[in-house]
Image (cartoon, rainbow, N blue to C red):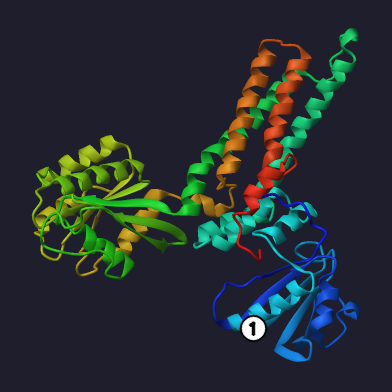
Amino acid sequence: MGYTDFNDTIIALATPPGVGAIGVIRLSGKEAISKVNEVFKGKDLSKEASHTIHFGTIRDGNVIIDEVLVSLFIAPKSFTREDVIEISCHGSNYIIQQIIKIFLKNGVRLAKPGEFTQRAFLNGQFDLAQAEAVADLIASDSEASHQAALNQMRGGFSGRIKELREQLIHFASMIELELDFSEEDVEFASRDDLKSLVLELSRVILQLIDSFEVGNVIKNGIPTVIAGKPNAGKSTLLNALLNEEKAIVSDIPGTTRDFIEDHMIIDGFSFRFIDTAGIRESGDKIETMGVERTMAKMKDASLILYVFDLSTDTTTEIFQEINKLENGGTPFIVVGNKSDIADSTIIEQVKKDPRAVIISANQKENLENLKAKIVEIVNLKSFKTGNTVVTNARHYQALFETNKSLEDVLTGIDGQVSNDFLAMDIRQALHHLGEITGEITTDDLLANIFSKFCIGK
């Protein structure tokens, strides 16, 4: 269902549900201050300055519900650019529900998911891409995902898109002007200059499109598969990295039949470690299915930690497997495990490979070097320089469609098509760019985006 009435006053719990020290209840709308004044016994909020906090009680008639602190934000100096009140009460579920119930009885409406942020967008607080970044910022669980969301929310990505769009609008207006003087055969927009601009736009947009692969793993975690033969120590390594007994460890080959997954933060980046079934031929149907899933996970991984048992594997076997990994094309690290019981000769031979890290997962030895190698191989350090990174699938699709339209513009210039067709392709590119920041929107699009937000945001 779309959002249509933004003239009323809304309310929602802004802090996570559950018992805590405090709960924060947020109201926004033209009657927010007057509705709170009706039940708040303290200062007259209508006479107080914006960005002030006031102590008092919330009452239902003569019954005191709680002692509270009320934060006052007067339009347009608020998140939604409407009058906003935030009530900090004790974190009892009963108290929170009683306070919200009082306002619902007095004509305040319960906010829909994301409605506070949607009002902020509609009132010009920020554009659509920045609004979406609010949800990403709340969900961020690593330094990298936090930085990506913060950069987008503060307008880094939007600024880049708007700059590109403004340049294209200038040429579009010149082409449209030529249509008005078509009988006089004048040229207001140099086709060479237009072609240079479109080529530059395509270059930048393709960079943004390519960054989505990095942005996606930053947002959702870098898929890192732990693979190798049975009993190489894959599950022991997962447990050692996570510092908990996540996977069952056994001397019996083929214990892991399916994959086990968990997250870990390394150097500010979120990694999704996936422990997989040991790779070997087996007559066991279920184990064979596990091996097939392992191979599929390896194909989809951003990084493979291929674990070798240095106490049993020969150098010939190890380097044969390394050759197979090289042919697979996915970045990998050679993890030589069980160094505490392995012969020093094989350790020295494996160490000659620059991708090799020698560890003992059981003794938790050299894990820090392994973590450092993981970050080095994935090579996301460039992200921390502040480069713009696309993390949103909707933005990726809009950029992809924009680039297709720009290719049509280039084809039209080279083929010397008429101005009306050229103008149509430029308008199409502008349309897709405008979808990112919200210059081009539909009610259905907005409803879909903001319905994914938590209530109270």
Q: Nearer the viewer, residue 108 or 280?
A: 108
* Mark 1 lies on residue: 95
Total of numbered circles in the picture? 1
Nearer to us in this view, 212 or 289: 289
Percent coordinates x, y for residue 125 in the rendering: 77, 56
Q: Residue at x 34, y 56 (%)?
A: 273
Position of the C terminus, as image quadrant, is: bottom right
User: Percent x, y for residue 366?
Assistant: 26, 65
The percent coordinates of residue 258 (x first, y second) are: 25, 53
- Depth order, front residue of 227/314: 227
Relative depth, front residue between 412 and 7: 7
234, above or below 239, in the image:
above
Left or right? Give the position of 176 relative to 340: right
Type of amino acid under label 1: Ile
- Residue at 67% of width from left, 80% of height from top? 98
Image coords of residue 172 (percent x, y): 79, 26
- SS of the residue at dot 1? helix
